[in-house]
Image: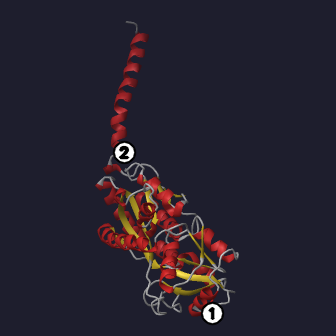
Amino acid sequence: MTICRMKKLASLLLVAGLLALSPIQSAFAQSPDAYPVKPIIMIVPFPPGGVADTVGRPVAEALSRVLNQSVIVENKAGAGGGIGMAQVAKSNADGYTVLMSLSSISIIPEADKLFGRAPSFTLDQFKPIARFTAEPTVLVVRADAPWKNFAEFLADIRKKPASYSFGSSGNYGTMHVPMEMLKSEAKFHMLHVPYTGAGPAVVALLGGQIDALSTGPASVVQQIKAGKLKALAHWGEGRLAALPDVPSLKELGQPVEFAQWAGLFVPANTPPAVMAKLREAAKTAANDPRVRQVIGGSGSPIQYLDAPEFQKYWDVDAAKMTQVVKLIGKVN
């Protein structure tokens, strides 16, 4: 064999050896212990401007610093959050696709059942990593609306039931359900106008296309401070730190409660080692001064729960929301 042929053979053997090793190297690179070795996608199932986006972006930035990998926020709006949630439910359970969800994750599967639809996802397709916020929704109207308080609002709506409308982030979402609960309790009617998220719904309220909405404080505190919107009541207990002058509906004789929480989830079969790294990173992010400043400044202070406590909280909340959806029934 000539020297030239020997060199070619050696080169071929080297290439073959590298090809044979590459799956092993790839498996090592993608192993849970090596996680993360590439950017992580955080799906926010709503447009920019809503609570999930307001929480998700500073958390994603902090996670990027903790994990030494980019965490890229992708807004996947539609179906009250169902489209983005379903995408994550069906994604690879490797830790590279995560979900920043609101409490509507507990509502949508039950609403699908109500209408006889195959559910777009089920709750057992997810595992919780951490809860970051949990605030009651707030009833807001334009600053120039004729109602000075909730009593005036309610009296006027009851007198002219076909005259007013409220917006939401989509059917059975976290802006729709609390209003349906209040309508049922207080015995009034308003036309429901669904949008793709809180951001577009708030824009519609500011523009006069709708008359009211219920949303998390983070979506509206800045507009309230700017004198463009006013809050009439909230769906929680006592007074809110961001809106201390706003009474709860319980105080006003309407015993309804609803919390719009934001939490991080992964597909159910994600390896425990990956989940452990994400939990530790989420805990660090929740205590990050920048995260606390940005999210707290938006009106929703950090109320962190680690995975075990969040799972218990979620189980209770999901059971409650199942009953609420059944009580509300089919609505448009």
Q: Nearer the viewer, residue 297 or 310?
A: 310
Q: Position of residue 25 (x, y in %)?
A: 35, 38
Q: Nearer the viewer, residue 92 or 87?
A: 87
Q: Which mark is residue 203?
A: none
Res. 223 image quadrant: bottom right
Q: Position of residue 78 (x, y in %)?
A: 55, 60
Point out the image quarter for the C terminus. bottom right
Q: CA distance from mark 1 to mark 2?
A: 58 Å
Q: Nearer the viewer, residue 243 or 73?
A: 243
Point out the image quarter for the N terminus. top left
Please give the name of the residue rendered at 42% of the width and 61% of the height, measured from the top-left corner. 113
Please give the name of the residue rendered at 33% of the width and 42% of the height, measured from the top-left corner. 28
Q: Dot 2: within a 10 Å radius of its alpha carbon, few (fewer than 14), some, or many (20 or more) residues?
A: some
Residue type at numbered disc 2: Gln
Q: Is residue 278 left or right of residue 143?
A: left
Q: Which mark is residue 30?
A: 2
Q: Under tag 2, what secondary structure? A: loop
Q: Position of residue 65 (x, y in %)?
A: 45, 61
* Placement of 291 over or under 281, stated as above or below: below
